[in-house]
Image (cartoon, rainbow, N blue to C red):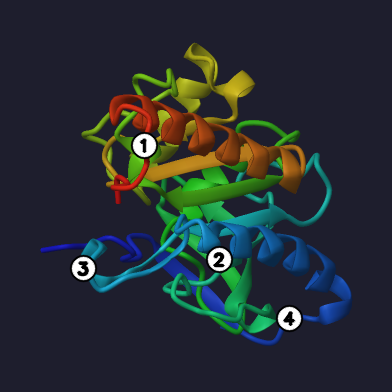
Amino acid sequence: MYDEGVIKFSARHEPRALEPSRYGALACTLTAWREIFALTQLVGQDPARYGGAGYGNVSGRVGAPSTARGRRGFLVTGTQTGGSTCVGLSEYCVVTRYDLAANRVESFGPIVPSSESMTHGAIYDLSTQIRFVFHAHTPIIWRRAAALRIPITDPSVPYGTPEMGREMHRLFTTSTLPELQIWAMGGHEDGVIAFGRDAEEAGQAMMRYLARAYAAECAERGGGLCARDE
């Protein structure tokens, strides 16, 4: 059974509107990059891909950088919003707490959090310097991750689980991940994640390797990109 986009953690969610005065500016920054990702098919929804489930999500930290692990709150796109053509505050929620050991997430907002929220939390726990996390689905990077020397998570580790959080820590402490700010999720088809101290840093990391992947494909095809690797 196909289970991409399925929430695997227990959720405690409080339905309520998000205040534009508090979250509007951050939401606009995230939405701007989400639009770029949608135009490049890194975020979206396609009946021919992933069983028709929406894919890709973006998040940004809220609150002080020094917040304790497990409580580094973030604004994140809600579950199954990949296919939304117009994203506003109604498509975001705030994750306030996450517990990797208990596999539990607490949040509030007009929509429940993305199925990748546990993974986002685990990334924010890696460093207080990380303020934005972008999760894309891009086969052209994912299939060439090893050739591009992008760190890759263990294929046996599924997305959205406590094990993925531990795998993130392993890569962050033993690989080039802190410098490259991007990795491929070996056990999550086409999943690639980038992070940064600001949105531009995270977005540029993703775009940098998207361009390199297309350049590699161009070389493989003898100088052409007419039949792209979809």
Q: Residue at x 21, y 34 (%)?
A: 156
Of the numbered discs 1 and 2, the one sitting upstream in the chain is 2
Residue type at mark 3? Gly
Of the numbered discs 1 and 4, the one sitting upstream in the chain is 4
In the rendered structure, are the residues bearing label 2 and label 4 in contact, judged by CB atoms less than 8 Å apart? no
**Mark 3–mark 2 distance (CA, rounded to whole Å):** 28 Å
Q: Residue 24 carries which label?
A: none
**Mark 2–mark 4 distance (CA, rounded to whole Å):** 15 Å
Of the numbered discs 1 and 3, the one sitting upstream in the chain is 3
Residue type at mark 4? Leu
Q: Residue at x 40, y 36 (%)?
A: 141
Instruction: Name the foreground residue: 129 vs 191.
Output: 191
Of the numbered discs 4 and 3, the one sitting upstream in the chain is 4
According to the picture, the residue beneath numbered tag 1 turns out to be 224
Instruction: Name the foreground residue: 128 vs 198.
Output: 198
Q: Where does the image place residue 189, in percent across and percent down from the top left?
A: 27, 47
Q: Answer whether residue 96 is visible to the viewer in this image.
A: no
**Mark 1–mark 4 distance (CA, rounded to whole Å):** 46 Å
Q: Is mark 4 on a helix, strand or loop?
A: loop
According to the picture, the residue beneath numbered tag 4 turns out to be 18
Quick check: 49 above or below 197? below
According to the picture, the residue beneath numbered tag 3 turns out to be 51
Q: How many marks?
A: 4
Q: Is residue 114 left or right of residue 123?
A: left
According to the picture, the residue beneath numbered tag 2 turns out to be 106
In the rendered structure, are the residues bearing label 3 and label 2 in contact, judged by CB atoms less than 8 Å apart? no
